Image: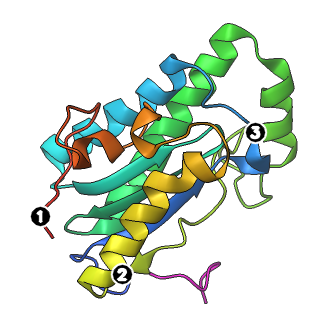
Amino acid sequence: MGRSRYKITEPDQPHFVTCTVLEWLPVFTRPETVDILLDSLRFLQANAGLKVYAWVVLENHLHLVVQAPGLGQVLARFKSWTAHELIRLLTERGVRAYLDRLAFAKRAHKADREHQFWQEGSHPELIGSAAMMRQKVDYIHFNPVKRGYVDRPEQWRYSSARVYLGESGLLEVCREW
């Protein structure tokens, strides 16, 4: 049996997913760390058939509504590449406190690496209806508002909320569902 009760049940259909930094470390507080995530998503859009319907990046996690052929493998590629690049950046910047925590909290079965960046799994939830899609898109866009970071969703730079208002955003988003 797998390590998570959450499964990608229909890999070619949209799913709501969450990726969380191990120990909830606030890594995504600088543009260069968020850029690593966005660059990876852009690459997967261009090269792996990834469709992004909604997204938000907060200081220690991100939510996405995404779809791709073989979504599980696409998410694994995303997490693997971003973990490598983020650990490289933290190492270059000498952020020992975070690196030490990522090494200490690493799962025992991750014997092939010194650090573990992401919590295991992405808690995928199949989007089964237009109503559920709307609920997840709203949840994603209102997440920074609920946390008190902004007054309106479109004020949060690292989100697809602006795109849903017809404005340009940082990542291509598919609004047709």
Image mark for residue 31: none
Give x and y (percent) for residue 111: 72, 51
Range of magenta residues: 1-8
Q: Using the image, determine if residue 14 lies above or below residue 142.
A: below
Residue 47: image quadrant is top left
Q: Give the side of residue 71 with respect to residue 2, left or right.
A: left
Sequence-wise, which precedes: disc 2 or disc 1? 2
**Which structural element holds mark 1?**
loop
Number of numbered markers:
3
Give x and y (percent) for residue 44: 24, 45
Residue identified by numbered label 1: 176
Please report contact status of discs 3 and 2: CB closer than 8 Å, yes or no.
no
Residue identified by numbered label 2: 132
Amino acid carrying mark 1 in the image: Glu
Give x and y (percent) for residue 144: 57, 45
**Which structural element holds mark 2?**
helix
* Quadrant where the C terminus is found in the figure: bottom left
Amino acid carrying mark 2 in the image: Met
Give x and y (percent) for residue 101: 85, 37
Residue 15: image quadrant is bottom left
Q: Using the image, determine if residue 94 lies above or below residue 176.
A: above
Amino acid carrying mark 3 in the image: Leu
* Residue 125 lies in the magenta-colored region: no
Image mark for residue 25: 3
Sequence-wise, which precedes: disc 3 or disc 2? 3
Q: Nearer the viewer, residue 35 or 150?
A: 150
